Image: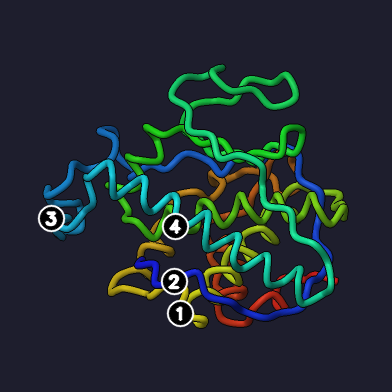
């Protein structure tokens, strides 16, 4: 993903859900050795020689993802005549318990929106590993999903099951990314769509996870469908309002 400018986009603000603390879920490669190292050959035979490794590039992508989300949602609120309030803080952490949400320690290998403190926190080591394994587009999805939970909280709408909340956030993340790409705030680079798909496959619930269980986010297929519904059809596809 490449950020072009701050840009402006229109749209209609619609209702969403309240989020507490959302955990995206760990990224794995299906093996036992962790993420493949940059420039090595993956199981499918492809070489990830172009995988980002630079710390400054990682930080820039995180910053650009946050700013583009703020640009998108500010436009949605403004179009509906409402004042937009950005999420208060974005917090990287490295150790379990280093950051807490409402008195609960945040786990490693995850990203979370905490409504109690109005912040997004992410395990920076896990995020860098995902960045190297999947690509920079995953960071935009990751921040887009968590930012969507912040928007849900601002709009004060509840769902009974967490899977409804999570799939809607995936759809909203897709709508945000589709919107900023269409508005030329970001440009889509070759391979980015595949990176989105790869990332969504990596964060789906494990096989056998009951859909009604607390904390369920949806299968890889459900999450991919929700994201691309938003990406292709805008917020109108996200079951809002």
Q: Earlier in the sequence, mark 2 or mark 4?
A: 2
Question: In this figure, which residue is indicated by the disc labeled 4?
Answer: 64
Q: Residue at x 32, y 53 (%)?
A: 134
Instruction: State the residue at coordinates (46%, 32%).
Output: 123
Name the secondary structure under disc 2. Answer: loop
Name the residue rendered at 56%, 81% in the picture.
232
Numbered disc total: 4
Q: Residues within 10 Å of mark 1 (few under 14, many from 20)?
A: some
Q: Which residue is mark 1?
A: 184
State the SS at label 1. Answer: loop
Residue 49, label in figure: 3
In the image, residue 183 above or below residue 142: below
Q: Secondary structure at mark 3?
A: loop
Q: Nearer the observer, disc 4 or disc 3? A: 4
Circle on res. 5: 2
Q: Which percent across, then down, holds residue 21?
A: 69, 37
Pair 1/3: label in front: 1
Nearer to the camera, 168 or 127: 127
Camera-nearest label, 2 or 4: 2
Q: Nearer the viewer, mark 3 or mark 2?
A: 2
């Amino acid at each position: 993903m490449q950020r072009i400018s701050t840009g402006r986009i229109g749209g209609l603000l619609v209702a969403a859900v309240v989020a507490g603390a959302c955990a995206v879920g760990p990224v794995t490669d299906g093996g036992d050795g962790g993420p493949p190292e940059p420039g090595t050959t993956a199981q499918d035979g492809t070489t990830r020689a172009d995988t980002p490794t630079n710390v400054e590039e990682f930080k820039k992508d995180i910053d650009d993802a946050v700013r583009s989300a703020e640009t998108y949602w500010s436009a949605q609120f403004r179009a509906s005549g409402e004042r937009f309030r950005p999420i208060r803080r974005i917090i990287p952490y490295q150790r379990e318990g280093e950051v807490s949400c409402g008195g609960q320690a945040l786990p490693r290998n995850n990203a979370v929106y905490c409504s109690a403190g109005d912040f997004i926190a992410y395990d920076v080591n896990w995020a860098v590993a995902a960045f190297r394994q999947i690509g920079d587009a995953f960071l935009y999805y990751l921040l887009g999903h968590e930012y969507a939970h912040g928007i849900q909280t601002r709009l004060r709408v509840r769902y009974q099951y967490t899977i409804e909340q999570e799939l809607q956030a995936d759809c909203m993340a897709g709508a945000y990314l589709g919107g900023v790409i269409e508005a030329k705030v970001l440009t889509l680079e070759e391979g980015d769509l595949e990176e989105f798909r790869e990332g969504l496959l990596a964060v789906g619930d494990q096989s056998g996870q009951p859909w009604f269980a607390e904390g369920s986010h949806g299968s890889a297929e459900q999450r991919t469908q929700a994201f691309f519904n938003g990406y292709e059809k805008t917020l109108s596809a996200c079951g809002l309002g």
